[in-house]
Image (cartoon, grey):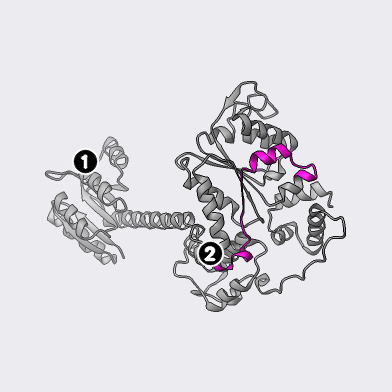
Amino acid sequence: MAKLLVVDDDKNIRRILSTFLESCGHEVQQAPDAASALAALSKEPDVKLVLTDFRMAEMNGLELLEQIKQQHPDTLVILMTAYATVESAVAIIKAGAYDYLTKPFSLDRVRQAVERALEVGNLRVENRALRDVVHDLPLTDSRSSVMQSVLRTARQAANSDATVILLGESGAGKNVLARQIHEWSPRHERPFVVVNCTTLSDQLLESELFGHVRGAFTGAIKNKPGRLEAAAGGTVFLDEIADLSPTLQTKLLRFLQERQFERVGGDETIEIDARIIAASNRDLEHEVAAGHFREDLFYRLNVISLRVPALRERPEDIRALVEHFLTAAALRNRRQGLQLSPEAMDALGAYQWPGNIRELRNAIERAVVLTRSDVIPREGLPDRVFQAPSPLRPPPPSGGTLEELERDHIRRVLAEAVTLEEAAETLGISTTTLWRKRKRYSIE
């Protein structure tokens, strides 16, 4: 049932439409003219749909539509007219009406138009609520003293143009913090462009970042700007920057020093003002010592370094994150009102979350999709939540490096996993990243 308003200077039409729509289960008000309609909307702002005549004295239907759009933007409007032409129909839709009805119309046509309009209105409300939830990730009001310290430094850094490097485990929220720094910065009205350094081959990644000119390589049929150009005036987030090849590290270093670059295959020097925020789940200082990452690039990036704590280091935030992900997943899956049982919440709070926030989000999404009742029970959570944490591995032998430890750990996980996807989930990384690490460490 929805609240509707019928506006027409013909009393009989108002009565017939109101009676019919009430028989369909709706609550219907009537207004004889536009002024009365606006007054009624002021008293009842939750009216979902207005059906209004086109030709009325003093203020016609299009003028009323314009007023409704300004004063009640969530209210949809269907215009009724006895003088429909192609031109008038186009004008009505361009003016912002959801639909129009040509008099004389059948009541079945009215019912169909009203049902479609209400469905669209509900979807708009749900989409807006989902966007609000997604953009309101409980990050800036963390209860963790460790995270609060990170956020204070991030907020200070946001007001500058200094390069920021975010370090921490996969899934800890580095990408969310990068976007938040951009939103806090004076650049927030300009683009925030993400470049994932693990998902493309070196040639494609170079083209994606710097752009290319026609004929630069097979398939380059026209000039294409890169992500740096797309981010002009804004921020570029380079995720998993440790995976950049030596060639790309050199080109990025030049950009950081001079704010200049050339497209792949081109000789025109392009100058762009874009801030760089980078992230890595690896120890970049160790990567420098091992000869895998340029030392000069590291120091160019390492102006402001922030370590995003793992979720197990900030257990105070688990409840807020669970509530956030539950609300978002319920909206996406049309399960509004779905709740989490106290036993399930206790289990989530006790788990160590090796996959961090990403693993928590996926666990909640799974529970929302698979739970049939209105309350998610403890049994609705993934089995791994109840598994005892793996015993601590013995320390690496004398002389072992972090790189060797990572390689051995990946080998063990791959040996125990049934599929590559399962191994990637256990490691808390994407299958693409796992594939690149296997290639790097020559793991079969």
Q: Compared to 383, does 266 lie above or below? A: above
Quadrant in which residue 87 is drawn: top left
Give the left or right position of residue 163, taking residue 111 as reference: right
| Amino acid identity at mark 1 | Tyr
Q: Compared to 415, does 233 lie above or below? A: above
Numbered label attached to residue 321: 2
Instruction: Give percent across and percent down for residue 379.
Output: 61, 76
Query: Which is nearer the eye, 75 or 134?
Result: 134
| Element marked by disc 1 | loop
In the rendered image, residue 385 lying in the magenta stretch gets the answer no
Instruction: Give percent across and percent down for residue 296.
Output: 71, 37
**Residue 436 seen in this snapshot:** no
| Amino acid identity at mark 2 | Leu
| Element marked by disc 2 | helix
Instruction: Give percent across and percent down for residue 57.
Output: 12, 44
Query: Which is nearer the eye, 227 or 164?
Result: 164
**Residue 133 seen in this snapshot:** yes
In the rendered image, residue 289 lying in the magenta stretch gets the answer yes
Magenta span: 288-317
Query: Which is nearer the eye, 59 or 112?
Result: 59
- Near mark 1 (Cα within 10 A), the count class, few <14, some 14-19 or many ≥20, is few
The residue where tag 1 is placed is 83
Query: Which is nearer the eye, 420 or 390?
Result: 390
